[in-house]
Image (cartoon, rainbow, N blue to C red):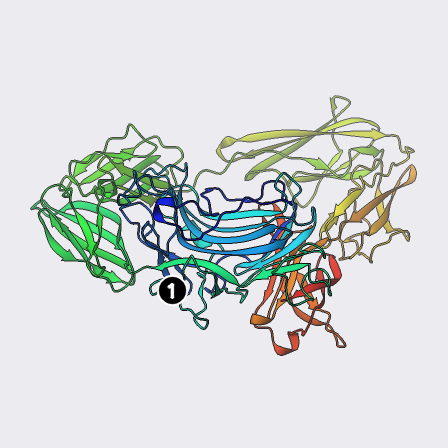
């Protein structure tokens, strides 16, 4: 018998309080004690039609640096439980249980906004445990300022299962597939932490965790939850709140996994065996913690000050957040108490100050009982800096930034130009930076103040366009190996820049030669005809704007008239994505005056059409195919010395689809199919079709593969499926992609 190290959330006296299973592990983890061979999560976390997950994070409580509350998508707000004497709260030990909680010296190193735990009897003395939580902790496990973290946790542990077997774990926040580990602590052992795992003062990343909406005792089953709480953490009880209507903890696997368990599933169809009962265990009861927040709180999010008018009066602008409908009052030495204006959960006030902002400036939520206060930290203050204009003159190569500061004594700096000194004008608050000899302007100007303020603004570009770029000559030939009397085209149209004039010249075996170049309709092309054998060098010189010139040459080898041609169809091309355009390359052929391409009957792919049969470089589109296909082509070249052939092969790479999960959920009449594809492109549409029994297949819809962290995945979802698209039992799906992938009979899970 192998026992997992388990902990309980059972209520214990404050003096003997200990850690729960939900330990502070401030890392994002999908891992156990050993190697997790598989971990598939369905459905995905957070905010599906605003019904799943957490919705909002509350103001920071200045007493401890954590959010006062988290709100779920049912608009339930839970506060952080930090009262050691509260019988419905759990937390880690505090150094001095006889003294009040105070940060940072007498505070637990972990506490919770919400916890739900469900144990399982796995048989043979082995145990299982599910823990879900929204947790507060510290990044180094020692309470200290700016180390506070929060995260949502889903942890599954089950001992005594079959090594290497795959188990399906269903819980209120989804369904996970886990492979049992074979290690010193073997079994199912997976922890998922998602949240604000490094301090940034916002704690909003925890909203992406799966642990919401909060679970609460089922109100239709006695006893009722204690007033002001979602449940009694010391009493197991049925719960509600799962967005998937899976208000239970269930583990399914191979037969024989849970022999002797007192919590075997009553439905024999659950688990891998349709008849066995020792392949599934479940529990519908949870120990729940959740203290409903009674205070909305307040948090000052931004504060600026500025001097206005000839009188030199100074004003402070304060911005704060709380719940809607609160009364927030600004106060401080020398400041008239001022009620902030509100819009939704946002609040604003401007107050007049005498000189510098007072050290005791604060905002109080008088709607709360007792009042919640947020003292305005001096680090929030900055003079109000505003960039009036930021202009770059192309012709003068000059950058000018006009900026206004709320403090006439502030020292302003223009980012990127540390030596720039602004000229003061107006009422000593307007400064102008002028920077000369700027070849490349910044896209954005940033001005900072030693008083804490800053502002950014886009740089406006003024002036004429830059001169045209210098010309760069480029000359190519349809072939560089010729026979006497053969004509080819020399092409200089790829030359860069605006060409005002062009000259061509030629040499034969090092000596100037004339009469070999004929003009065409384009000044940058010539027709070359060789009157005799030898090595010819053709030179092209182009001239452009600003007296710029560029010269390039090409060498041509001319053989006697009877030289046999050589065909070169290019290298074989493989792994071509269906619907891609393939360019054949016969340019390497020598002494050829004509080209002829043919498609050989040995080809195995669908029919193709070449853009031209008589050019050196024709193209064709690779047609869709569900299997690997090959196209065999042959190039025949003809010249004065005869003809020659060369084959080339093009092979496709049809899409390959993989299926990660396929299910139909009766609760919301919802189809969900997820998987991967080899080809990620906008034209690779994945189509999902239900193989409806005794009827024609029913197309459910499509999805488009997309890259996610370098992996090509797709996710099809159909909610509120019409009656004709609702199965009554398990079945199969056909999944195909536009680029040839197909899975013809994918079983789906009927939830």
- Is residue 378 in sight in this rendering? yes
Query: Which quadrant holds the C terminus?
Result: bottom right
Q: Is residue 153 left or right of residue 105?
A: right
Name the quadrant containing residue 562.
Answer: top right
Q: Is residue 440 left or right of residue 32?
A: left
Q: Nearer the viewer, residue 740 or 303?
A: 303
Give me the residue at 69% from left, 62% from top: 277
In the image, residue 685 sits, relative to residue 551, either above or below, namely below
Q: Nearer the viewer, residue 415 or 263?
A: 263
User: Label 1 belongs to which residue?
Assistant: 75
Name the quadrant containing residue 747.
Answer: bottom right
Q: Is residue 664 left or right of residue 364?
A: right
Q: Is residue 527 left or right of residue 492?
A: right
Give me the residue at 64% from left, 35% from top: 474
Looking at the picture, how far across and down is residue 368, in whole percent?
A: 23, 59
In the image, residue 169 sits, relative to residue 689, either above or below, namely above
Looking at the picture, how far across and down is residue 169, in whole percent?
A: 60, 56
Name the quadrant containing residue 667.
Answer: bottom right
Q: Nearer the viewer, residue 188 or 748?
A: 188
CA neighbours of label 1 inside 10 A, class few (<14), some (14 to 19), many (20+)? few
């Amino acid at each position: 018998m192998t026992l997992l190290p388990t902990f309980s959330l059972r209520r214990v006296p404050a003096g003997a309080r200990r850690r729960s299973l939900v330990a502070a592990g401030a890392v994002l983890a999908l891992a156990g004690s050993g190697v997790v061979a598989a971990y598939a999560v369905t459905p995905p976390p957070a905010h599906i039609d605003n019904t799943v997950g957490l919705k909002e994070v509350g103001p920071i409580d200045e007493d401890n640096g954590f959010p006062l509350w988290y709100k779920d998508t049912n608009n339930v707000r839970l506060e952080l439980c930090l009262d050691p004497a509260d019988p419905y709260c759990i937390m880690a030990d505090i150094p001095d249980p006889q003294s009040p909680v105070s940060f940072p010296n007498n505070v637990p190193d972990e506490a919770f906004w919400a916890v739900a735990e469900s144990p399982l009897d796995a048989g043979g003395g082995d145990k299982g445990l599910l823990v879900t939580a929204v947790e507060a902790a510290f990044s180094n496990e020692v309470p200290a300022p700016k180390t506070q973290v929060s995260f949502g946790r889903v942890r599954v542990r089950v001992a005594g299962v079959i090594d290497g077997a795959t188990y399906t774990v269903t819980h209120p926040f989804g369904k996970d597939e886990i492979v049992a580990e074979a290690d010193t602590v073997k079994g199912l052992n997976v922890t998922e932490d998602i949240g604000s795992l490094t301090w940034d003062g916002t704690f909003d990343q925890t909203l992406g965790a799966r642990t919401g909406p909060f679970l609460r005792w089922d109100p239709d089953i006695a006893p009722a939850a204690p007033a002001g709480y979602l449940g009694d953490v010391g009493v197991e009880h049925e719960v509600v709140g799962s967005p998937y209507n899976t208000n239970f903890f269930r583990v399914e696997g191979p037969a024989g996994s849970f022999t002797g368990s007192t919590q075997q599933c009553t439905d024999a169809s659950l688990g891998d065996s349709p008849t066995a009962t020792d392949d599934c265990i479940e529990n519908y009861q949870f120990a729940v913690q959740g203290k409903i927040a009674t205070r909305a709180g307040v948090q000052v999010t931004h504060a600026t000050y500025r001097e206005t008018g000839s009188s030199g009066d100074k004003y402070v602008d304060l911005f704060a957040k709380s719940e809607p409908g609160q009364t927030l009052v600004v106060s401080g030495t020398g400041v008239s108490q001022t009620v902030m204006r509100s819009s939704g959960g946002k609040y604003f006030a401007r107050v007049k100050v005498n000189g510098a902002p007072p050290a005791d400036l604060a905002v109080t939520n008088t709607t709360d009982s007792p009042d919640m206060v947020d003292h305005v930290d001096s680090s929030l203050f900055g003079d109000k800096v505003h960039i009036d204009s930021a202009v770059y003159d192309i012709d003068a190569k000059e950058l000018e930034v006009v900026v206004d500061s709320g403090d006439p004594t502030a020292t302003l700096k223009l980012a990127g130009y540390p030596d720039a000194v602004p000229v003061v004008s107006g009422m000593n608050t307007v400064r102008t930076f002028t920077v000369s000899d700027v070849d490349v302007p910044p896209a954005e100007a940033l001005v900072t103040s030693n008083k804490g303020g800053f502002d950014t603004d886009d740089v406006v570009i003024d002036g004429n366009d830059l001169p045209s770029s210098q010309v760069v000559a480029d000359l190519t030939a349809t072939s560089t190996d010729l026979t006497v009397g053969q004509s080819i085209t020399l092409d200089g149209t790829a030359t860069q820049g605006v060409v005002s004039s062009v000259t061509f010249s030629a040499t034969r075996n090092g000596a100037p030669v004339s009469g070999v170049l004929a003009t065409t309709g384009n000044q940058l092309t010539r027709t070359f005809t060789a009157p005799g054998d030898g090595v010819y060098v053709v030179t092209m010189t182009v001239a452009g704007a600003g007296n710029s010139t560029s010269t390039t040459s090409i060498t041509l080898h001319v053989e006697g008239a009877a030289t046999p041609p050589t065909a070169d169809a290019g290298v074989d091309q493989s792994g071509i994505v269906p619907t891609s355009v393939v360019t054949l390359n016969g340019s390497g052929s020598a002494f050829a005056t004509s080209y002829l391409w043919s498609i050989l009957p040995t080809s195995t792919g669908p029919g193709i059409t070449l853009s031209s049969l008589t050019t050196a470089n024709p193209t064709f589109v690779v047609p869709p195919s569900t299997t690997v296909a090959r196209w065999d082509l042959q190039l025949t070249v003809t010249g004065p010395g005869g003809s020659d052939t060369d084959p080339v092969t093009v092979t496709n790479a049809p899409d390959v689809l993989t299926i990660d999960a396929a299910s139909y959920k009766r609760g919301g009449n919802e189809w969900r199919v997820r998987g991967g594809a080899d080809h990620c492109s906008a034209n690779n549409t994945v189509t999902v079709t239900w193989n409806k029994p005794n009827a024609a297949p029913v197309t459910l819809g499509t999805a488009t593969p997309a890259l996610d962290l370098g992996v090509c995945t797709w996710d099809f979802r159909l909610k509120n499926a019409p009656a004709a698209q609702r199965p009554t039992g398990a079945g199969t799906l056909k999944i195909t992609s536009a680029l040839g992938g197909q899975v013809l009979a994918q079983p789906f899970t009927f939830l």
